[in-house]
Image (spheres, rainbow, N blue to C red):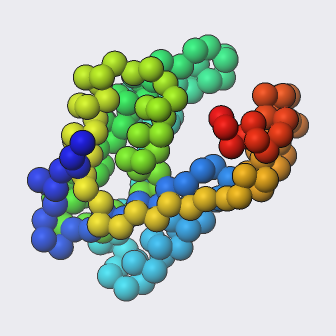
Amino acid sequence: MTLTTLHKTRDARYFIIDGISTVDNGRYTNFLMSYLQTRFGQDRVVLTSQPWYTGTRGDEILSALREEHPLPYDWILQNRSDHLTRIIIPALEQGKLVVQRRGPYSTFAFDRVEPVELSNRLSIHHRMEAHDLEIILDDPAETAHHLLKADHEPQGHSLDTLQTIEALTAA
């Protein structure tokens, strides 16, 4: 599977900070963005993240999550494709420095979980830009389990299937 560099100008750079939800990758993304804005100017830096509630299917995704309906993974792929077309590719064509929270590895990880039609997978992955730097953040399994429980149990979301660290790491 090959990522493309067709849309980049010589001065464009694409940075991604990725990782599991418990590592607060947004904080690191904002830190990198602030540094780049200070060094190269605010108008040169674009901050973005993989879309959930924005894009072509954003309203439908939000509604499905609120109503606890099944969420077709194709909707997420359509949003990511729209994100590439509307935000990433134009910014790179203009020579911008793009800082993105979550990127191709998140998409690949979701593909491993959800059964997605092969042609849909390939169409989005072939359109993804090759990044200049990707930082993948991780937490120890025990920390991730503790943070997930703290986030989800007060909302009534049970983690019964993740009773032990072994279950968490095997999931």
* Residue in the picture at 67% in, 37% down: 170
20 to the left or right of 145: left
**As rendered, which of 58 and 71 lies closer to the eye?**
71
Above or below, 89 against 27 in this view is above
- Location of residue 23 in the rendering, given as x and y in whole percent from the top left corner: 65, 58
51 is higher (above) or lower (below) than 3: above
Q: Residue at x 67, y 59 (%)?
A: 139
Quadrant where the C terminus is found in the figure: top right
Give the quarter of the figure containing the N terminus: top left
Q: Residue at x 34, y 79 (%)?
A: 41
Q: Total of numbered circles in the picture?
A: 0
Residue 21 against residue 97 in the figure, above or below: above
Residue 97 or 161: which is nearer the viewer? 161
Q: Is residue 122 left or right of residue 109?
A: left
Residue 27 falls in which quadrant of the image?
bottom right
Residue at screen point 47% across, 73% down: 32
> Could you tell me if residue 86 is visible in this image?
no
Query: Residue 119 at what x, y percent from top left?
Result: 25, 23
* Left or right of residue 26: residue 33: left
Tell me residue 105's x, y (percent): 42, 48
Extreme residue toward the top, this view:
69
- Residue most extreme to the bottom: 39
Is residue 70 visible in the rendered image? The answer is yes
- Residue 51: x %, y % from top left: 45, 41
